[in-house]
Amino acid sequence: MCGIVAYIGKRQAFPIILKGLYRLEYRGYDSAGIAILNGELNVYKQAGKVSDLEKFVEGKNVNGTIAMGHTRWATHGEPNDRNAHPHFSDTRNFAIIHNGIIENYASIKEELMQRGHKFRSETDTEVLVHLIEEINKNGKFDFDESVRLALNEVVGAYAIVILSKKDPNKLIAARKGSPIVLGIGEGEYFVASDATPIIEYTKNVAYLNDGEMAIISDGKLTVKTIGNKIMVPYIQQLEMNIEAIEKGGYDHFMLKEIYEQPRSIADSMRGRIDSRGLRVRLGGLGEYENKFVNAKRVIIVGCGTSWHAGLVGEYLIEDLARIPVEVEYASEFRYRNPVITEDDVIIAISQSGETADTLAAIELAKSKGATIFGICNVVGSSIPRATHAGSYTHAGPEIGVASTKAFTAQVTVLTLLAFQIAHRRGTIPASRFQALLNELESIPSKVEIVLKSNEKIRVLAQQFLNMRNTLYLGRGYGFPVALEGALKLKEISYIHAEGYPAAEMKHGPIALIDEEMPVVVIATKNASYEKVVSNIQEVKARKGMVVAIVTEGDQVVKEIADFSIEIPECDDTLLPLLSVIPLQLLAYHVAVLRGCNVDQPRNLAKSVTVE
Ligand code: G6P
């Protein structure tokens, strides 16, 4: 949700900032802007994408070795030029970029207006830069101190960078609730919302903690808290490589990420299965494994696709480990006064590790004494730092806004966890545990086989081109997959899609079925196969078009359905990992055919750091 990037050093900053903005564009693309400090403090900004900004600055003076850039996902104020970041203070001596929300902006704004400040935008952000100027104006406090004091007055979440014309060799960044990574090069520093704009210049990074600010000037970095305590930054090495964040010959990141799944699923389980010792080792679980084994209840929280992975987790843990599980939307959980006890184990799932509602749900559960286990993809992000224990999914950077490989990686980690806990609790025999582990290890090669249906699915996508509604049905382990398939289609192709438990169709959605409504059904040979076949008959009787995901060699469904896509046979518990792949491909091809921006669907953002 909003991307920020900044540079201070000896090189020309503009190309670094521009490239960084392209990398961060997945976080929001309502507007983009840049500020360059070169004696003057120049700001160029515009509604639209980074490519629009690039055209806009052509021929303008972008010289300078200190600069910052912003790509916006609008919260306060519509996405127009005025509301684009950076924002100036009244005198234009200060400029700010911000990711987050200043919650008490209205009262501060009111006070500043009474003191004569004139605001140019409707944003909450502009208030902060005016406040800094107000504190700084009579010379009592220098730049650093003015920023620090201002941050003590604001309530809310922020990752900010501020430049001052009066301090032409300085850059200040600060964070609370929104991420900031500092890149540390030779006599140069980078600041960004994630490591992708930094990776090609340096692998040395430090993550700012909540309530910390970084003051960089004259080749020196000082980190202190907004309470004025000097901190020693913990510098670590980035493990990501540059290929991971480029398209590598694919038309879109989403397609690349779909195709990466045999590898990313393998990476999620790499080194974690000890078939000989007959156990799963999730490094980050450690002594907390016993908490799971003895848990009276597990609560899974997440948003969007991560919530769907959580639903798979519920089915797995209840089915195999026999522990009651509840799956909660983080946004509901945090506000609905849930019952949480010290005996509860909470699993928080998040690709980005930054989702505001999930973070808040974690804090709530922590305050009630529950144990929190995180499943996240982005290393060093906020959620893994807020949890007691956790496992990274190791899917690598996911850039397409619609989540694909992160989902299958989350499900892989949940599967490993469920298998291990079930084994420890003795709710599955050792022979089944062994068989499940073996089957799980064969999933990457089975995903390769599913990917071979790509061309068939591309042709099938034509059928969806002019459709306005679709229904996705599944039962058991197929139900969360139906939800995820529907979400993929609606996010990127803007065709309305609903996921439903197949049997529930009779209680409402059946009324919608006609020739204009494709129905996608997970109809693989599992426990509820016969029942799903009956559901398909019910759709056909009403002239619905059925697209079925079937098990290799199936004849029955193939005969009734209009189109079918085969997936290899697998244990029921592993069905989500295979059956979701054709649905990802289907959504992708439909969106491409409809001319939609696959990687950056309208109104969405990949990392939602506002509630
Ligand atoms: C946004 C993204 C989704 C994602 C959800 C949760 O809505 O567009 O793809 O599933 O946030 O994000 P998280 O990073 O917590 O998994």
Image: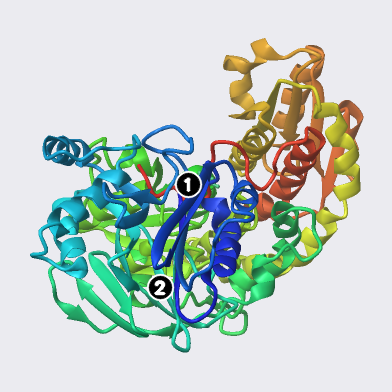
Q: Kindly state the secondary structure of the residue where label 2 is placed.
A: loop
- Mark identifier at residue 481: none
Q: Mark 2 Cα within 10 Å, few/some/many (few <14, many 20+)?
A: some
Look at discs 1 and 2 and give the one toward the viewer.
Answer: 1
* Front residue of this view, candidates 311 and 533: 311
* Front residue of this view, candidates 330 and 39: 39
* Front residue of this view, candidates 150 and 496: 150
The answer to whether residue 86 is above or below residue 172 is: above
Amino acid on which the number 2 mark rests in the picture:
Leu
Q: Kindly state the secondary structure of the residue where label 1 is placed.
A: strand
Measuring from the top left, give residue 390's x and y in whole percent: 41, 68
* Front residue of this view, candidates 142 and 265: 142
Q: Earlier in the sequence, mark 1 or mark 2?
A: 1
Measuring from the top left, give residue 243's x and y in whole percent: 69, 73
Q: What residue appears at the point 60 percent right and 64 percent down from the top-left corner?
A: 19
Q: CA distance from mark 1 to mark 2?
A: 36 Å
The answer to whether residue 236 is above or below residue 436 is: below
Q: Is residue 262 left or right of residue 313?
A: right
Q: Is residue 272 left or right of residue 582?
A: left
Does mark 1 have its CB less than 8 Å from ligand 1?
no
- Mark identifier at residue 72: 1
Q: Is residue 463 left or right of residue 3?
A: right
Most extreme residue toward the bottom is: 186
Amino acid on which the number 1 mark rests in the picture:
Arg
Q: Find disc 2 in the rendering and name its residue.
A: 285
Measuring from the top left, give residue 442's x and y in whole percent: 74, 67
> In which quadrant of the rendered image does the C terminus lie?
top left
